């Protein structure tokens, strides 16, 4: 449930002269909490790396079919997969820490 942002908080953000992106992120953090902003960033990273992996896989499959697959394309595919794995792992670790009560740790 988003928290209400007060006029004073908005005025403070406007006074800082933030860029549009920084302003939106600051408002989001006020509404949902700082950890929600980090969670959003991690989910975005996961989605972006998944898309890059998908594109690298599609390109490799096309090259494999026509017999012109190059070693650099395999390296790109492996790197994209490793980036996606790291993003998913980091997101999972964060979500696990976020849902485990402090007393249970």
Image (cartoon, helix red, strand yellow):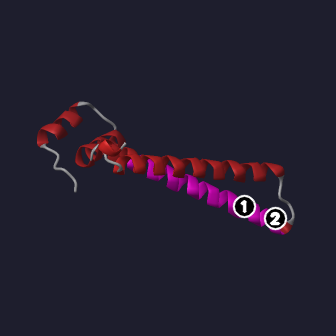
Residue at image location 19% in from the left, 50% down from the top: 3
Q: Determine which quarter of the picture holds residue 12.
A: top left
Residue at the farthest top position:
16
Q: Is residue 21 left or right of residue 8?
A: right
The kind of secondary structure element at disc 1 is helix
Q: Image point 22% across, 53% down: which residue?
A: 2
What's the distance in space between the residues labelled 1 and 2, CA to CA?
9 Å
Name the spot of residue 101 as percent of width and height, x first: 31, 47
**Residue 73 placed where, x, y %?**
77, 53
Whether the magenta-drawn stretch holds residue 55 is answered as yes
The percent position of residue 24, horizontal first and vertical second, equals 31, 45
Residue, disc 1: 59
| Magenta residues (range) | 39-65
- Mark before the other along the chain sequence, 1 or 2: 1
Taking depth in this image into account, of 18 and 81 the one nearest to the observer is: 81
> Could you tell me how many numbered marks the image carries?
2
Say which residue appears at 26% left-offset and 44% top-offset: 27
């Amino acid at each position: 449930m988003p928290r209400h942002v007060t006029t004073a908080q908005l005025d403070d953000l406007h006074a800082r002269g933030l860029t549009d992106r920084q302003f939106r992120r600051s408002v989001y953090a006020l509404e949902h909490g700082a950890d929600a902003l980090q969670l959003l960033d991690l989910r975005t990273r996961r989605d972006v790396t998944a898309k890059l992996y998908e594109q690298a896989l599609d390109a490799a499959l096309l090259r494999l079919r026509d017999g012109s697959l190059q070693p650099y394309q395999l390296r790109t595919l492996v790197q994209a997969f490793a980036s996606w794995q790291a993003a998913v792992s980091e997101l999972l670790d964060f979500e696990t820490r976020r849902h485990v009560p402090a007393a249970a740790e």
